[in-house]
Amino acid sequence: MLKYYLCLVWRDLLLVMRQPAAVFNPLVFFVLVVSLFPLGVTPQASQLSQLAAGVIWVAALLSTLLSLDLIFRSDYDDGSLEQLLLGSQPSWLLALAKVTAHWLVSGLPLVILAPIVSSMLFMPYHALPGMLLALLLGTPTLSLFGAVGAALMTGVKDGGILLSLLVLPWYIPVLIFGASAVQAASSGMPMNAQLALLGALLIFALMVTPAATVAALRVGQMQG
């Protein structure tokens, strides 16, 4: 099962390399949102540093929404998704591999870029470890919850707005606890409670979303 899982992840990474624009567009969007925010609100460092946590998390959430269509769309279009679901290995392992590949090409780059763009918002340097830890816990949760919505939309053309409406209610707790953790780190306050809640959300998503994604895939294929 581990070999099957790793082969699926590697396969998806190779497929993504064939369409790099689909990966770079959400990352460019993330950088643009953060970099344009000071121009549209205020250039004052004291105010920007207070807003930095929320801006980075909102930009990361929206960037993840833009990349959700990458998870299943190409496999659905060429018919390979149905063959993978009919394989002898557990279907939930397929869903977990898809989410892992999605996080590696969308969530992990956001974590890497976050310290760079946070300097545009004058975030204190002592808050960077807390921000990275919060993003490492929160971005996989965004991918896991988003996979359920993306699976439901596999048979629907131009369902981007509907997909956003489906997954946003699940994203709100991650946004609240993630931004609160970074804000606490910036203020020099303990962030253990927020990190614990983010970890609990991640564990809950790992337990529930793979099976829910498989069920949503079957429903999505029936719609198609």
Image (cartoon, grey):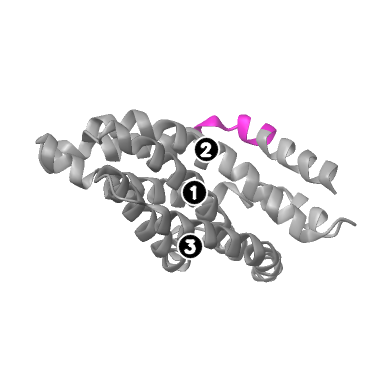
For image coordinates 49% across by 48% down, the residue present is: 139
- Choose the circle earlier in sequence order: 2 or 1: 2
Q: Return the mark for residue 163.
A: 3
Q: Magenta segment range?
A: 14-21
Q: Quadrant of residue 185?
A: top left
Per the picture, the main secondary structure of the magenta-coloured stretch is helix
Identify which residue, 149 or 122, lies in the foreground.
Answer: 122
Q: Position of residue 138 (x, y in %)?
A: 47, 51
- From the viewer's perspective, is the residue at label 1 or at label 3 nearer? 1
**Spatial separation of the CA atoms under disc 1 and disc 3:** 17 Å
User: Mark 1: which secondary structure?
Assistant: helix
**Residue 211 relative to residue 73: left or right:** right
User: Mark 3: which secondary structure?
Assistant: helix
Amino acid on which the number 3 mark rests in the picture: Leu
Residue 70 vertical position relative to residue 210 in the rendered view, above or below: above
Q: Position of residue 46 (x, y in %)?
A: 12, 39
**Residue 38 relative to residue 210: left or right:** left
Which residue in the structure is indicated by mark 1? 139
In this view of the protein, can residue 224 be seen by the observer?
Answer: no
Which residue in the structure is indicated by mark 2? 108
Q: Position of residue 204 (x, y in %)?
A: 59, 65
Q: Residues within 10 Å of mark 2 (few under 14, many from 20)?
A: some
Amino acid on which the number 2 mark rests in the picture: Leu
Q: Position of residue 79 (x, y in %)?
A: 75, 52
For image coordinates 24% across by 31% down, the residue present is: 120
- From the viewer's perspective, is the residue at label 3 or at label 2 nearer? 2
Amino acid on which the number 1 mark rests in the picture: Thr
Quick check: marks 2 and 1 in contact, CB under 8 Å? yes
